[in-house]
Image: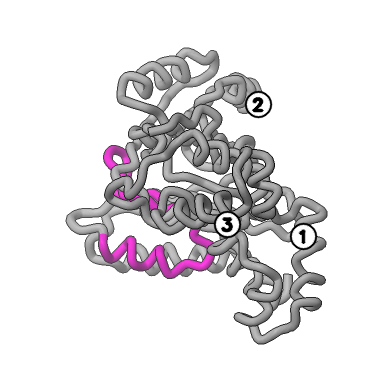
Amino acid sequence: MDHLTEHAVTILRRDGRASYIEIARRLNSDRTIIASRLAPLFQDGSLRVTAAVHPRFLGLNVLAHVSVRVMSSVDTVANELIDMSEPVFISETTGRFQLVLELHLAGLQELHDMIQRIRGVPRVTDVEVALYEHMIASFFLGEEPEGLARSIDPVDLAIIRELQEDGRLAYAELGRRVNVSTSTARSRVQSLLESGVMQIGAVHGRDAAGSDLVFGLGVVVRGSTDAVVDLLLTETGLELLARAVGRYSVIATVAFSRVADLQRLLLELREIDEVQFVDQWLHVRILREQYHHDAVQAG
């Protein structure tokens, strides 16, 4: 991917509804050139635009990172986990644990029940959990707001569901699908975006040619996590960043085009005085990566 395409994708990652004209203006380029770079990525599935909502706005207040150690066949256990609807992320990984999951649940009882189900899967020998205390960045979502600035009603939910399927859906078509006027669809989307409830951004297909190496990082910190968070926020490939409670103080997912870039980041992290330990794992095969929740409820 050339630099112009990379910059265009970066803009879409932050603003999934940016027009080709707007992207061209920001990059001092031409609409036709930008379209020639991005259209093939949309057509072959390498790139798509979707809407996402911070899960706590949907009543999902327990966000957990779950590491699973498997005795033998990873595929057998992975298939059992894929049959469970609750995990929003499932990945085969290298390192001490063979599978990593992310759970977004309503409460601690649901988390307890899910961990018991996972431990009950044959060939699972160990499960470790870290809770996300605060989500700082998640894919194209920014930091989760401290409070819900507006309520979400059934029309909002219908709009969110449509934009989860196609984040660049035209307002006229969006309004037709949810039975409101074009102007109402536009104002509702803008309100959801401005309040921080929803964001729309571009995501890469993981199977695309030239896909980056995706690494997970778990950092144990003595004292303040600020220096670690500030460093990780400078990484262009940052996909997830959260302060955590439990196994790690900070958990991150970062994509790198070269292993040397990971080595550089690990060195910089270990030079921070507050850092006690840095763990890392490669996401060898991402089996589920879900940016939305099927059971969204109006608040």
Residue projecting furthest to the left: 223
How far is disc 3 from disc 2 in space, using C-alphas?
31 Å
3D distance between C-alphas at marks 3 and 1: 14 Å
Vertical placement of residue 70 versus 95, above or below: above
The answer to whether residue 49 is seen in the rendering is: no
- In which quarter of the view is residue 19 placed? bottom right
Amino acid identity at mark 2: Asp
Residue 92 picture location, percent across and down: 59, 37
Asked where in the image residue 64 lies, by quadrant, the reply is top left
Nearer to me, 153 or 135: 153
Q: Could you tell me which residue is drawn at 32 percent across and 62 percent down?
A: 228
Question: Of circles 1 and 2, which is in front?
Answer: 1
Counting other residues with Cα less than 10 Å from the Cα at mark 3, is it few (<14), some (14-19), or many (20 or more)? many
* Residue where numbered disc 2 is placed: 75
Q: Position of residue 181 (x, y in %)?
A: 61, 48
Disc nearer the start of the sequence (3/2): 2
The residue beneath circle 1 is 41
Which callout, 3 or 1, points at the residue further toward the start of the chain?
A: 1
The residue shown at (76%, 51%) is: 45
* Callout 3 secondary element: strand
Q: Is residue 83 magenta?
A: no
- Residue in the foreground of this view, choosing between 160 and 179: 179
Q: Which residue is mark 3?
A: 201
Magenta-drawn segment: 226-251
Q: Nearer the viewer, residue 173 or 121?
A: 173
Amino acid type indicated by mark 3: Gly
Which numbered marker is on residue 232?
A: none
User: Few, some or many C-alpha atoms within 10 Å of disc 2 (few <14, some 14-19, many ≥20)?
Assistant: few
Of circles 3 and 1, the one toward us is 3
Single out the residue that lies furthest toward the bottom: 28
SS assignment at label 2:
helix
Left or right, residue 299 beside residue 69: left
